[in-house]
Image (tube, rainbow, N blue to C red):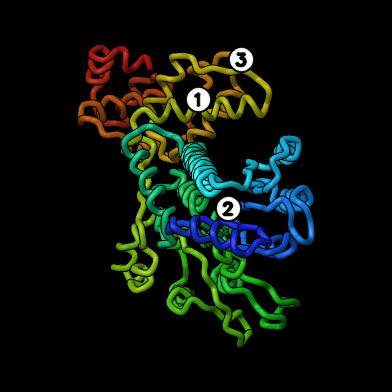
């Protein structure tokens, strides 16, 4: 821990030595003495925690020095020490911002000792409050980005907190739409380097022949069209985060160049010779199983182990019990606030939202909610307003974990919807008897009504 810095402005060398010796008995204190006000002012850049000033100094009086100190460091506690017992002088200094006024006598040392202890205790409490406030703000920021109370998402919160405390690389996995970039942003926002840039780049969206220049930059004339020098994403990230989304799509040739940069912590721009130091943290994301990609020869094993760092797996929305309606309310509130309207979910709409599998995860839920609000009449979002744009009913059906009987019922229900309730047509398509369909509808009427 850094020591508590105390500056003393006192032109009486003997008296200043007494104060310095007395205060230095506390090993946590670092005491510096200055013979003039000008010398003390010149040293304020060293950021003392407290300053004591003699009222009468060779180059200025206490009021002048106090004003100069507080002008440069308005929050620093200043204690005036003087041989004058004039009450008006003390009151004037206190009005001008002095923390305390101590008269020079046999009790000065003890009074100063106690005053400094009080100041230090006050500053310690203030610092604790600041740190606590930061933690609360960081926690709130994380939960603003990634909302949920399910067991799976709470585990993610814990890993975000661990990842934010160090500069370890992070690898985030999960299905499309689960919020991998939001997790990367939350880790960066809670880290000590939060003031440095967060630079995202989607590997899958940039042609492989341009990716090297995008990451490492290029020099003028490096290739056709390179009309000027360009700084790459690694350099732009500085001491912050370079987020490589869909890292599993990176070309194998470029993987080897990325590995070298990670090993050497330096790069060379395309068409250049200068080695440039880089110091950003790498956070990657993918919906693929990278270990399987390594086994299949699509991803370098050595790069995989460089990037894996702290692995964070995001659960799909269908496995986040209770989070669907929580997120739905959040999306409704946000959309309504932006559009200055008021909407609420009906019980039937909420029930319909809860039963769906969401192959597109949180991203899909947000789109469904916004469309439902636009389609709704009045303040209540009805069941009919909730529409799922399923690409493939059969594949989305498999996201649910059901019994074989439940799957049979669901398949028949889907075909009845597809063929507008035509039992004869459905029996032909599924190669089952009409009586079987009617029996299923009779045994589970509520299911087929939904």
Q: Position of residue 117 (x, y in %)?
A: 49, 45
* 78 shown above or below 46: above
Most distant residue in the left direction: 404
Q: Name the residue under label 3.
A: 377
Instruction: Give the label, 1 or 2, closer to the camera.
Output: 2
The answer to which of marks 3 and 1 sits earlier in the sequence is: 1
Which is nearer the eye, 286 or 102?
102
Q: In which quarter of the image is the C terminus?
A: top left
The answer to which of marks 2 and 3 sits earlier in the sequence is: 2
Q: Name the residue under label 1.
A: 329
* 249 shown above or below 71: below
Which is nearer the eye, 308 or 88?
88
Q: Where is residue 96 in the image (x, y as percent from the top left)?
A: 75, 40
Q: Where is residue 294 in the image (x, y as percent from the top left)?
A: 32, 68
Which is nearer the eye, 419 or 266?
266
Instruction: Give the label, 2 or 3, closer to the camera.
Output: 2
* Distance of label 3 from label 1 (alpha carbons): 18 Å
- Disc 3 crowd rating (10 Å Cα; few below 14, some 14-19, many 20+) is few
Q: Mark 2 points at which residue?
A: 49
Q: In which quarter of the image is the N terminus?
A: bottom left
């Amino acid at each position: 821990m850094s020591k508590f810095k105390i500056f003393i402005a006192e032109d009486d060398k003997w008296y200043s030595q007494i104060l310095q010796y007395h205060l230095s008995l506390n090993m946590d204190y670092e005491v510096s003495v200055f013979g003039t006000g000008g010398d003390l002012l010149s040293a304020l850049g060293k950021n003392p925690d407290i300053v004591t000033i003699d009222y009468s100094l060779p180059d200025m009086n206490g009021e002048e020095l106090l004003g100069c100190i507080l002008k440069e460091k308005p929050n620093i506690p200043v204690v005036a020490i003087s041989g004058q017992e004039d009450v008006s002088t003390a009151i004037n200094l206190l009005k001008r911002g002095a923390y305390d006024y101590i008269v020079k006598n046999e009790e000065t040392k003890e009074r100063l000792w106690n005053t400094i202890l009080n100041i230090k205790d006050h500053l310690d409490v203030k610092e604790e409050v600041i740190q606590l406030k930061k933690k609360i703000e960081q926690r709130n920021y994380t939960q603003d980005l990634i909302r949920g109370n399910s067991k799976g998402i709470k585990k993610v919160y814990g890993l975000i907190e661990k990842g934010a405390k160090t500069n370890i690389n992070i690898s985030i996995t999960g299905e499309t739409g689960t919020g991998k970039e939001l997790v990367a942003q939350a880790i960066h926002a809670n880290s000590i380097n939060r003031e440095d840039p967060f630079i995202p780049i989607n590997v899958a969206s940039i042609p492989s022949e341009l990716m090297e220049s995008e990451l490492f930059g290029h020099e003028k004339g490096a290739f056709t069209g390179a009309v000027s020098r360009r700084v790459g994403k690694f350099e732009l990230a500085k001491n912050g985060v370079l987020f490589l989304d869909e890292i599993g799509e990176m070309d194998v040739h470029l993987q080897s160049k990325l590995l070298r940069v990670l090993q050497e912590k330096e790069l060379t721009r395309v068409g250049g010779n200068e080695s440039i130091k880089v110091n950003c943290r790498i956070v990657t994301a993918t919906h693929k199983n990278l270990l399987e990609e390594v086994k299949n020869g699509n991803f370098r094993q050595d790069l995989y182990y460089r990037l894996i760092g702290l692995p964070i797996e995001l659960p799909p929305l269908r496995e986040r019990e209770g989070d669907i309606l929580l997120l739905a309310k959040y999306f409704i509130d946000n959309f309504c606030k932006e559009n200055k309207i008021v909407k609420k979910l009906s019980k039937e709409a909420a029930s319909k939202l809860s039963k769906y599998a969401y192959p597109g995860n949180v991203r899909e839920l947000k789109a469904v909610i916004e469309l439902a609000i636009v389609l709704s009449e009045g303040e209540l979002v009805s069941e009919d307003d909730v529409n799922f744009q399923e690409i493939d009913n059969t594949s989305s059906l498999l996201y649910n974990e059901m019994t074989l009987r439940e799957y049979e019922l669901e398949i028949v229900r889907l075909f009845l919807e597809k063929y507008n309730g035509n039992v004869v047509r459905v029996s032909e398509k599924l190669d089952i008897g009409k009586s079987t369909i009617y029996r299923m509808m009779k045994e589970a009427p509520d299911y087929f009504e939904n």
